[in-house]
Amino acid sequence: MSAHIQIEPVLRPMCPEDVPRVMAIEREIYPYPWTEGIFLDCLRVGYGCWILEHHAQLAGYGVVSLAAGEAHLLNLSIASDHQGRGLGRILLRHLVDFIRRLGGEVVFLEVRPSNRAAVHLYESEGFARIGTRHRYYPADRGREDAWVFSIATVG
Ligand SMILES: CC(C)(COP(=O)(O)OP(=O)(O)OC[C@H]1O[C@@H](n2cnc3c(N)ncnc32)[C@H](O)[C@@H]1OP(=O)(O)O)[C@@H](O)C(=O)NCCC(=O)NCCS
């Protein structure tokens, strides 16, 4: 189990002013980060963009799209110095609840098979692996597959 956190994190919608700090984390934790323009586009089109603050610091963020009852978890990120304390699980549960409240019935996501922390997190939250997208991600040598996971939010 992850170590228990002492102070409850705060979850709030992302705003454009957050994007520079989001980008600092994004560049730190991903070899192939999203760009600032992608985050601004997600905000502009009304995707669910959330910030997780812990000890008054921007510790994580997530982005979901939702249409016709089908949601896609596009980004789930915790800053490296906040990882391993249960915050990723809290953020993931918040995003799934958010999707459910908006009428989303199923959530899909892609993850690198090599990302053991994320794969463990999704499986332990009840996501099921439903397929593979071959050569989906850029990688140091060529391309890496994506595992596709999904979960039903109702029933
Ligand atoms: C994946 C990520 C969101 C998880 O957030 P986190 O706050 O570090 O995770 P948590 O502390 O909530 O732990 C979640 C579970 O993963 C496990 N875990 C953490 N690191 C792990 C690792 N390297 N290998 C296996 N399991 C790991 C934890 O033990 C915990 O399981 P448990 O409660 O059964 O012990 C975070 O590590 C991250 O942002 N990584 C970089 C970006 C990324 O990969 N995002 C996901 C893209 S699909």
Image (cartoon, rainbow, N blue to C red):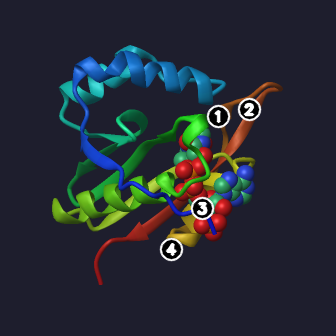
Q: Type of residue at label 1?
A: Tyr
Q: Type of residue at label 2?
A: Arg
**C-alpha separation, residue under disc 3 versus residue under disc 2:** 34 Å
Dot 3 lies on which element?
loop
In the rendering, which numbered label is found on residue 15? none
Mark 1 or 4 closer to N-term? 4
**Residue 147 in the figure: left or right of residue 13:** right
Dot 1 lies on which element?
strand
- Position of the C terminus, as image quadrant, is bottom left
**C-alpha separation, residue under disc 4 versus residue under disc 2:** 27 Å
The image shows residue 144 at horizontal and vertical percentages of 73, 38
In the rendering, which numbered label is found on residue 3? 3
Residue under pointer 4: 126
Residue name at image x 25 percent, y 18 percent = 17
Q: Furthest-right residue in view?
A: 141
Mark 3 or 1 closer to N-term? 3
In the figure, residue 137 lies in which quadrant?
top right
Mark 2 or 1 closer to N-term? 1
Residue name at image x 27 percent, y 68 percent = 105
In the rendered image, the vertical position of residue 151 relative to residue 58, given as above or below = below
**C-alpha separation, residue under disc 4 versus residue under disc 3:** 21 Å
